[in-house]
Amino acid sequence: MKRCLFVLIGLLCTNLGAQVKKEIFESFKLQERRNVSYYFPEDYSEEKKYPLILVLDAEHLFDQVVAISKFNSQFQGMPQTIIIGIDQLENDQRWEDCAFDEQTGLPTEKGKLFFEFLGMEIIPSIETKYSTAPFKMVIGYDITANFMNYWLFKERSLFNSYISISPLLAPEMESRIPERLATMDKHLFYNLITAGNRDKITNTILQLDRGIKSLGKENIHYYSDEYPDASELSVITYGLGKAWERTFQMFKPISPKEYKTEILTSNEPVIKYLEDRYSMIEELFGFEKPMELNDIMAIYAASLKKEDFESLKPLSDICKKLFPDTMLGFYFEGEYYEQLGEPKKAFKTFEKAFQLDEIDFLTKDMALEKIDALKADFGY
């Protein structure tokens, strides 16, 4: 399966030219010209909103990020994105852009200017011209993976998602990042990807990993992956796809694993899981995603499995709005009244369901069986 994925991504990489634009950006902050690449979906529309992805070390990462975005939006139901790539290899610019003071761990003067260049020039220039969603992601590798963490220390983080690949951490960063995340109340995704070789650098990464894991905050969505057989460059290919999938997991239909490990194990009403999932999408991405029938059926199954019959009523109300010509909403409502011990209301509601179109596994015969059972039990 992995091989098939890499082949598909490879094919997508060969067809990027039509959607990728390159620009020499005249930076007022840096007082220099910088090479920048942009990817826009080929069917870009002002009617839609697109998450914005900033890719540092673009020579290493940009093409792979674009290919992964295209693959996931085409085959996995995830949102299309606008991607900005900053070239940094020429004349070793990455080391000047992202340099830090060895004593304080803070950016050098050039680093501060580069920080302002990205946050005050590059990103605003795209946001004023294109229809972007509130959601922003930043991706870095090695020294640039360390640099992107400085946005965490702004009063409000510019980015909602961080993908950090083999970071070369500044002094004290392994403790400063967890301390900062502990104070945040917004939803934030943090993916840490490392190769398997052990040295002083990876020891600080292990401390960072333990520090973030110890937080246990529901709004901090933290994932770490180590690839023992990967080199410092191949780890990029190994880790990016998985990190991307986790960040945009909420866009995929509820999986059997998610059903078992998250919905069935939660102490909250199952309807809350569905409502929170779609509320988070609207909050982060700035648009309302229609509820998947698969997700509705998962919540229905969980309601019965956990005997959480109170969740059936709001679920039925949702179905009446989304699938008004089908029996879905009234059938769920009928089961709600049935479990509540109100057979008369249940009988009338199942009759309404019987008159509407079948959907998924629900058939008119099932509604008729409910009606006949209620007749037999209560003589209606």
Image (spheres, helix red, strand yellow):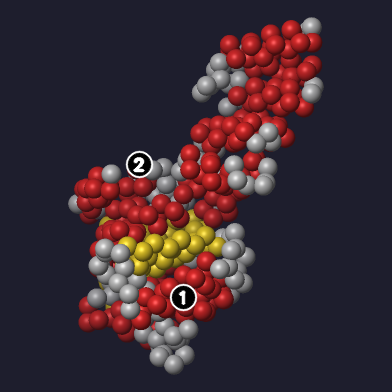
Tag 2 residue: 75
Q: Is residue 135 above or below residue 184?
A: above
Residue at 40% x, 57% y is 243
Mark 2 or 1: the one toward you: 1
Q: Residues within 10 Å of mark 2 (few under 14, many from 20)?
A: few
Residue at 53% x, 77% y is 153
Dot 1 amino acid type? Gln
Residue at 65% x, 44% y is 272
**Which part of the image, by quadrant, shows the C terminus?**
top right
Residue at 56% x, 47% y is 262
Label 1: element kind: helix
* Residue 17 badge: none
Could you tell whether 340 is left or right of 161 in the image? right
The x, y position of residue 87, in whole percent, is 28, 71
Could you tell whether 106 is left or right of 215 in the image? left
Q: Is residue 36 visible?
A: no
Label 2: element kind: helix
In-front residue for pair 336/266: 266
In-front residue for pair 48/363: 363
Q: Residues within 10 Å of mark 1 (few under 14, many from 20)?
A: some
Tag 1 residue: 207
Could you tell whether 15 is left or right of 249 in the image? left
Q: Is residue 309 above or below residue 287?
A: above
Dot 2 amino acid type? Phe
